[in-house]
Image (cartoon, rainbow, N blue to C red):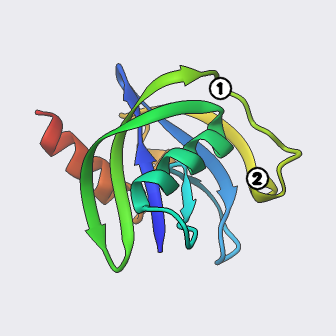
Amino acid sequence: MIAQGIIVQGNSVLMVKQFVQRGDLVWNFPGGGIEDNETSEQACIREVKEETGYDVRITKLLHEKNEKYTYLAEIIGGELFLDTVNEYNQDIVEIAWINLDDNDKFDSFTTPMLNLYLENAG
């Protein structure tokens, strides 16, 4: 079970560049595994904090399929910071605000979620 957050400000979305299980280095939405004692919402908030330094609140469940939850979230505190000391962040090499028009950064996993966000944002 995985929870991830889509955080958009202006014309940019918050992304983390990380190594994934298939060995590729890709841009992903911040997120990760749901622990036994937490809801998918709590996992999303915790993972975004761990991976980006931002405190967020969930505004909407955008999509759920095969126990992968994608939430829309907004920043309520904290600041952009990659904690490389945290062992859970060893796969992350960069955090950045990616322009929504920068199609090179999005792949077959992130593009559909971004399109769903854009459809709902209208």
- Determine the residue located farthest toward the left in the rendered image: 122
Report the residue at 50% width, 45% height from top: 45
Relative side of 82 to 96, left or right: right
Q: Amino acid at mark 1?
A: Leu
Report the residue at 71% width, 41% height from top: 94
Residue at mark 1:
80
Percent coordinates x, y for residue 108 in the rendering: 40, 65
Give whichever of discs 2 and 1 has the lower sequence position.
1
Image height of 47 relative to 53, above or below: below
- Determine the residue located farthest toward the front in the rendered image: 37
Q: Which mark is residue 103?
A: none
Q: Amino acid at mark 2?
A: Asn
Quadrant location of the C terminus in the rendered image: top left
Percent coordinates x, y for residue 61 in the rendering: 26, 52
Image height of 102 relative to 77, above or below: below
Relative side of 37 to 6, left or right: right
Assess disc 1: are there few (<14), some (14-19) or many (≥20) residues with their C-alpha within 10 Å of its C-alpha.
some
Mark 2 to mark 1: distance in Å?
Answer: 14 Å
Q: Which mark is residue 89?
A: 2
Relative side of 92 to 12, left or right: right
Report the residue at 76% width, 58% height from top: 88
**Location of residue 31 by image quarter:** bottom right
Percent coordinates x, y for residue 86 in the rendering: 83, 49
Q: Secondary structure at mark 1?
A: loop
Assess disc 2: are there few (<14), some (14-19) or many (≥20) residues with their C-alpha within 10 Å of its C-alpha.
some
Q: Are marks 2 and 1 in contact (CB under 8 Å)?
A: no
Image height of 102 relative to 90, above or below: above
**Location of residue 111 by image quarter:** bottom left
Relative side of 76 to 47, left or right: left
Q: Nearer the viewer, residue 58 or 14?
A: 58
